[in-house]
Image (spheres, coloured by chain):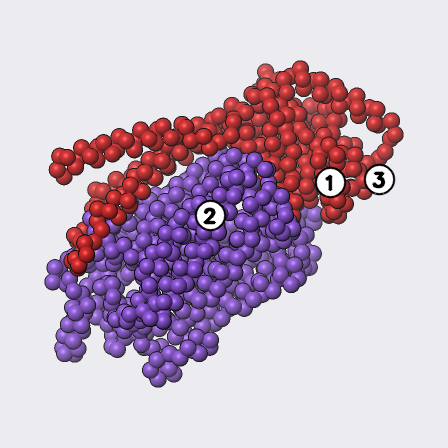
Amino acid sequence: MNIPNSITTLIAGIVITLISLWYGQNHGLLPVAASADASDVDDLFNLMMTIATGLFLLIEGVLVICMFRFRRKKGDLTDGPSIEGNIPLEIVWTAIPTLIVFVLAIYSFEIYNQMGGLDPMASRGGMMAMHNHGGGHNMDSMVAMGDTNDSRMAIGIGKSPGDGDEPALLVDVNGLQYAWIFTYPETGIVSGDLHIPEGRRVQLNMKAADVIHAFWLPEFRIKQDVMPGQVSKLSFVANREGTYPVICAELCGSYHGGMKTTMTVDSPEAFDEWVQSRTVAMQSQDSVAVNPSDLSDAAFLQSYAEEMGVIENTLEQLPHVIPDDAVSVLPQ
Amino acid sequence: MSDATIHHAGDRKWTDYFTFCTDHKVIGIQYLVTSFFFYFVGGVMAEMVRTELATPDPDFVSPEVYNQLFTMHGTIMIFLWIVPAGAAFANYLIPLMIGADDMAFPRLNAVAFWMQPVGGILLISSFFVGAPQSGWTSYPPLSLISGKWGEELWILCLLILGTASILGAINFVTTIFKMRIPDMDIHSMPLFCWAMLATSALILLSTPVLAAALILLSFDLMAGTAFFNPTGGGDPIVYQHLFWFYSHPAVYIMVLPFFGVISEVLPVHSRKPIFGYRAIAYSGLAISFLGLIVWAHHMFTSGTPGWLRMFFMATTMLVAVPTGIKIFSWCATLWGGKLQLNSALLFAIGFLSSFLIGGLTGVMLAAAPFDIHVHDTYFVVGHFHYVLFGGSVFALFSGVYHWYPKMTGKMYDETWGKIHFVMTFIGFNLTFLPMHYLGMQGMNRRVALYDPQYQSVNQICTIGSYILAVSTLPFLVSMALGFIKGEAAGRNPWRALTLEWQTTSPPQIENFEEMPVLWAGPYDYGIDSESEDGDEDVEDMLTEVANVA
């Protein structure tokens, strides 16, 4: 390799590196991050984007150069040089990707673990809370109430609160074609949109009434399938006030695209106010006692339909396959 | 084999292509033309999907019909377009490349082909009873409650096509191992044959698992059993495991044959040996093996525990290593060559540049924390179209242009071929690149209605898809002009070294006049300056050997 050629290669390498480093931080492809975990995921993506940009520029650059520099001259019927391989080069381009994927795998593992994806206590807590809403944190009663489901590993992602921390705000989530219903077991609030306080851990215990749905919070970079017959959970801490979309991400039928609501992250004070206002509203409504299990699904959901943005027709189309235990997630 | 004697009389009649013919070349063409027919059918559905998505409201078709369209689009493009198109090349090329006169089991081969139209007609006929609308993944419980008969026809279609795929794979493996000319050891075999070995291994190991899953799903659907139905105590997650145990390898089943096509096209048109023959051959086998242990990366947000997600994250990332080896080796093959930028090579380079993006986003998706964000979004839709359109389909067109002279004996129209490439490349990138952005921002997939803030980007995608649709016209023009008034191609218009170019174009019914002679390795370009005008050399060698004999 002659000298000018090495210099050109060196400069090209530096330019590619600089562009990759810059673009990896400034791609602007992700929406705002509303939790610390989301920012960690973004850091991981930015690293991957940096590496990907570098490889993209390298390979596309080689291809473009080939198309111009190594184009066959008209009338030239000779062959190119007979190069059948180059062992050192092949070792390099095997070793470098191997190294990259090892680094990415370990880094991803760290982030996933940090988000609580491997937190066994969180998993078990998630299962039990489901069978225990409104009943406080009595271990004995939970064990007594445990059914065979409790021995199964719970599914989901998110940390359990540490010993000294404030207990997590529990919310039961029920997914059904084509709406989300949120129940706050501690206060009995039932809502079509989710309200949570900023800075406090929230734990969602999720179950589907009919088919598989997926609960996705794009601004929190978390998503978890919500399944009939099996509880899954998400736990997270919001660090940014605002109203964010809640989207169903698993095909659940013809109006799958319309199955969305919002999650409002309030300041702790504003959240308390919201809880107060909803509790008062509930008490005035509850003067006529109705046993929800006596009503059809459509009739029962009617009163929530408006605030959930669900059209009446959708309710009437509700499938009649909702298992009994799924309805029990709704307020008693 | 012995069947070849039935067709002793000279050339093929056009009616042969509509019969139960056991000639592997006829079957190859039958596969290719049939798969192109379904490409156009599936393409029309894709255009209807994109038209619907030009606006945020479900106004072009009803949401039910929309779900039917993308379900049928996915099923058709996978099972009736790309998989059989791979089988088309394998059928046509393997016997020619290894110097055999036919496949090992010609009748089985014809049976496998004729299952294609049967499966295809069953699938299309589901429109009369309400087409399936639970996606090509057909997850229960949704698939159990959204139209019984459409779903059942979908299952039957896949069982038939899966069986055909298994029959084909048995044929390919046996032919490659048992019917090579004696001179050709496994390391002087063209790389396309290596790719088909890796593909066939995957088909044989994974397709039966899909069949099992579909039969159980069928019981749930028709007989009210509860293998997967949670209302009866079944587990829908088990279906997902069984489904992806086939359907992730299916991605490699769809792309490995076309890796093989690229390994054939690049050396010929850049006049250089393939760079790292063994590395490319073995990395295909490595992809095939790894492909069997990565399926649950489709289930990172499903009912899977954390440790399982981490295991499948690690194995999935490893796939990047053998895939990287291939991409680097192909680039090194081009580097320093004498590139003839015809339609075949342009599509091959288009393949490299597009598939690269699919590979890079693939590594991103393997990282579970990021995948959890973009799973089931348009990011994934963008990713797999870069792999399957930017990868498989670009390479498929490259292969069609490359072997068109061999298959028809005439040259295609180069100008229209190049227009086809430019339009496809622009239309493809315009359609699928913006989807990555949409997915990361928050647009989920499989939706007939979406948030109005995504409308402008979606319209770019829709315009791109129209360009892509129109780009098939120059392709058809190039093919038709070649067929009507293309100049005669001769035996070896590309001066290529693999055996299929030693016989006439199109090859005679018995493939070769006599057993072909392996006078050079498949990619020995530039080794001997004497061999510049290779065509004559082949003739010389043949006469020489004939004289000796």
Percent across and percent down for residue A307 are 73, 32
For the residues labelled 1 and 2, the Cα–Cα distance comes to 34 Å
Percent across and percent down for residue B309 are 50, 38
For the residues labelled 2 and 3, the Cα–Cα distance comes to 53 Å
Q: Around disc 1, counting alpha carbons within 10 Å, would you say few (fewer than 14), some (14 to 19), or many (20 or more)?
A: few
Element at label 1: loop
Q: Which chain is red?
A: A
**Above or below for B245 versus A186:** below
For the residues labelled 3 and 1, the Cα–Cα distance comes to 22 Å
Q: Nearer the viewer, residue B419 or B232?
A: B419
Q: Which residue is mark 1?
A: A311
How many marks are shown on the rendered structure? 3
Percent across and percent down for residue A271 are 67, 19
Element at label 2: helix
Q: Is residue B91 visible?
A: no
Image quadrant in which the N terminus of chain A is located: top left
